[in-house]
Amino acid sequence: MSWRLILAIVLLALGASVWGGIQMGNWLVENGPLRAPNMVAIEEAALLMPTLDADGKPYVTPAPQPLINGRLGVPDELEPFDWKITAKTADKYNPPIALANTRLSASALSDLRQQDSTSPSGLQGIARIGPSGSRGAQAIQPVDITIPPPPPATPVPNVGSNSSWIPQFQREMAACAQRGFFERPSCSWDVRNKYCGPNNAWGQVDGCPAK
């Protein structure tokens, strides 16, 4: 038996199985059991009815939000706490604000005047440190503050008395910076050798590196 005949038989079998499956599906659809009309109406009405929660209100699914553990979800509801404010009448035995009704003696008034006077540290009122009944308030303990030394002065380049060449040197270095990528290094070193060497400015002037 040649392979062409075998291939033709396989293709015919596949086509027959596909056609038979389509016909069987159509027959099942036409002869399958139908739902009763009253069941269809009940299911449609159930779909239209809203879902209610325990209080009889429409239930709405809460939106997910970031949780403490870093995940996204719906947090657990906290247990309700039944709190209330105790009603209490304010009278002369239970005033809302405690008022001072004690008369001060002459010595107590003298102590208060002494406390109101300026302390040796220059502080007054609540800024003074010391017991409330003491005649002389104690001064605040001084704090040692270490003042940092001033920054070192910028070293002056030791290029001798003749420094008039520096502006011209900087202009030529700026002109070399405007050249191409391959011409820039050779131009810069030509300018350095022209000015830094004769003026002994290697490591002394910006643009003249130390050798």
Image (spheres, rainbow, N blue to C red):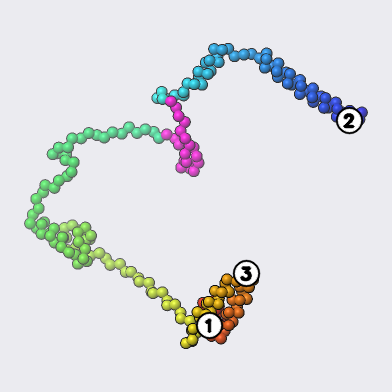
Q: Are marks 3 and 1 in contact (CB under 8 Å)?
A: no
Sequence-wise first label, 2 or 3: 2
> Can you give x and y, in whole percent of width and height, for residue 59 in the image?
44, 27
* Category of crowding for the residue at label 1, using alpha-carbon neighbours closer than 10 angstroms: few (below 14), some (14–19), many (at least 20): many
What is the magenta range?
58-77
Distance between mark 1 and mark 2 Cα atoms: 96 Å
Sequence-wise first label, 3 or 1: 3
**Front residue (pair 109, 37):** 37
Distance between mark 3 and mark 1 Cα atoms: 26 Å
Q: Residue at x 61, y 76 (%)?
A: 187
Judging by the rendered image, the residue that carries numbered circle 2 is 4
Does the magenta segment cover residue 98?
no
Sequence-wise first label, 1 or 2: 2
Task: Specify the label residue 181 is tagged with.
Answer: 3
Q: State the quadrant of the C terminus.
A: bottom right
Judging by the rendered image, the residue that carries numbered circle 1 is 201
> Can you give x and y, in whole percent of width and height, for residue 165 in the image?
51, 83
